[in-house]
Amino acid sequence: MQFRRLGNSGLHVSVIGLGTNQFGGKVDEAGVKDLMDAALDGGMNLIDTADMYQDGRSEETIGKAIQGRRENFLIATKFYYARGEVGPNEKGGSRYHLMNAVEASLRRLDTDYIDLYQMHHWDESTPIEETLRALDDLITQGKVRYIGASNFSAWQLTHAKALSEMKAWNEFVSIQPHYHMFERGIEEELIPACNYFGWGILPYFPLAGGFLTGKYKAGQAAPKGSRGEQSPYVQKYMTDDNYAVLGQLTTFAEERDHTINELAHAWLLGQTAVSSVISGATSVEHVQANAKASEWELSTEEYEEVTKILDGEDE
């Protein structure tokens, strides 16, 4: 497993991180421990969760799985969304909600600190100054070590940075966006901003909900039990054009003795601003396959060739 700095910070993260949105749901407590064991065996140190995943059960199962070995993992979690039927103050980026949310996450994770605390979404109803000051206080208190954002635009991140610099507050070190081979909107503004200002990118959904695993075939029904049977998210990628591109990508990978899964991760890591790819898993085999993807480092020529396929410029 390779490691990269998280943005301009001094923290080093595994280039493949473990996504845990199914922990405490599809993956039970025993399964979570098995997956965490596999992640550790594969060299992963970054575990990404959120207080909303499975209504807090993801954090709870992670908290049990890290007991006795907390120092082996970097735990990243998120706040913003409401959980269940709650009042108007139990969501967003207000100091009130933030302080309540971090204490609840610390309890569920059964830990004294969170390595990377991320704002899950921009909050239009709360001045970002209020959120940033509260996050800075959490770092001062030792409850949080680094802060990041998720689903922010380039201007939102830049505005937050300017305020943090002006007030001498701790700054966001990372951004977690929706980014994969068939979802490339962040390349226009966010990636150039990250390259310039030094934010680390942590892409989520790197396999497009499974579309980039090769399990879906043109002209065939989605495999029974797969997400593609019912998920509109996966189904939106199941077009003739995308299947044609997928076929070319699969051939490219197989000609080099790799899988499309490995290519999807390797291509994302071809972006120098990407610190780690957050890849979800529901089985030990998934974790092992994702970890193996870190072994493939695309050459400049390979990266450009794949990008041409995605751009429809291949001959």
Image (cartoon, rainbow, N blue to C red):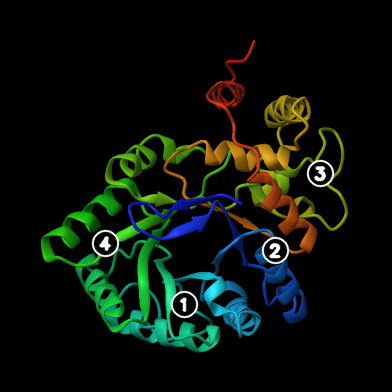
Percent of width and height locating residue 85: 51, 84
Q: Residues within 10 Å of mark 1 (few under 14, many from 20)?
A: some
Asked if labels 1 and 2 touch by Cβ distance under 8 angstroms, the answer is: no
* Label 3 SS: loop
Percent of width and height locating residue 75: 51, 71
User: What residue would you read off at disc 2?
Assistant: 41
Asked if labels 3 and 2 touch by Cβ distance under 8 angstroms, the answer is: no
User: What residue would you read off at disc 3?
Assistant: 215
Q: Which mark is residue 82?
A: 1
Mark pair 3, 4: CA separation: 41 Å
Asked if labels 4 and 3 touch by Cβ distance under 8 angstroms, the answer is: no
Q: Quadrant of residue 295?
A: top right
Mark pair 1, 3: CA separation: 34 Å
* Label 1 SS: loop
Q: Nearer the viewer, mark 2 or mark 3?
A: 2
Q: Nearer the viewer, mark 3 or mark 4?
A: 4
- The amino acid pointed to by label 3 is Lys
The tag earlier along the polypeptide, 2 or 4, is 2
Q: Nearer the viewer, mark 4 or mark 1?
A: 4
